[in-house]
Image (spheres, grey):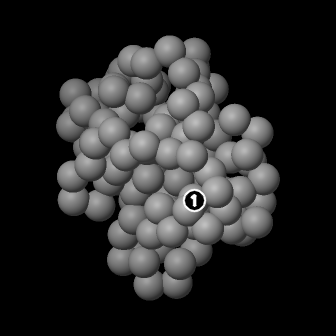
Amino acid sequence: MIEKILDKNNIAYKVIDGEGNTTIIKINGKLHMLYIHNKGNQFQVERDFFEYIDGNSIPYVILCEDDNTHVLYYLKLNKKANWVKSCFDTCDKDVIYLGKQVLNSKVTETDLIKELKKY
């Protein structure tokens, strides 16, 4: 779980909301993280969770974790325009799969911590 990683590395955070395998976490009061974990490497994001992080003024990222292998996938998204936002804008689905973009975004725990400490 991401909370263990954040605690171990002394990164301040607050859990905002969560349901099932998805949690919204505020990092250092300056970044929203949509954390999604799943058994396997197929991840989906719900419209409600995405609209919450996209509707706030602070930047956001998506972190996915495969519960079987503990591989992390880190998606840093542009707030104004990004592929997740355009997927939701062009369809009426309540859930979308994140697909290949996630699989091409593996990150080590060390690199993740370096990235999060920037905020």
Q: Which residue is mark 1?
A: 6
For badge 1, the amino acid type reads Leu
Q: Is residue 117 above or below residue 73?
A: above
Secondary structure of residue under mark 1: helix
Q: Out of 67 and 7, give the one closest to the viewer.
A: 7
Left or right: residue 118 versus residue 31 is: right
- What quarter of the picture does the C terminus occupy? top right
**Is there any visible trace of residue 106 in the rendered image?**
no
Q: Is residue 82 above or below residue 112?
A: above
Q: Out of 70 and 4, give the one closest to the viewer.
A: 4
Please name the residue shown 33% across and 26% down the image.
Answer: 51
- What quarter of the picture does the N terminus occupy? bottom left
Please name the residue shown 76% across and 39% down the image.
Answer: 118
Q: Horizontal and vertical percent for residue 17?
A: 28, 42
Label 1 environment density (alpha carbons within 10 Å; few <14, some 14–19, many ≥20): some
Please name the residue shown 73% across and 46% down the image.
Answer: 117
Q: Horizontal and vertical percent for residue 52?
A: 33, 27
Q: Within the image, what quadrant is residue 109 found in? A: bottom right
Q: How many marks?
A: 1
**Is there any visible trace of residue 9 in the rendered image?**
yes
Q: Horizontal and vertical percent for residue 15?
A: 37, 46
Q: Is residue 23 above or below residue 37?
A: above
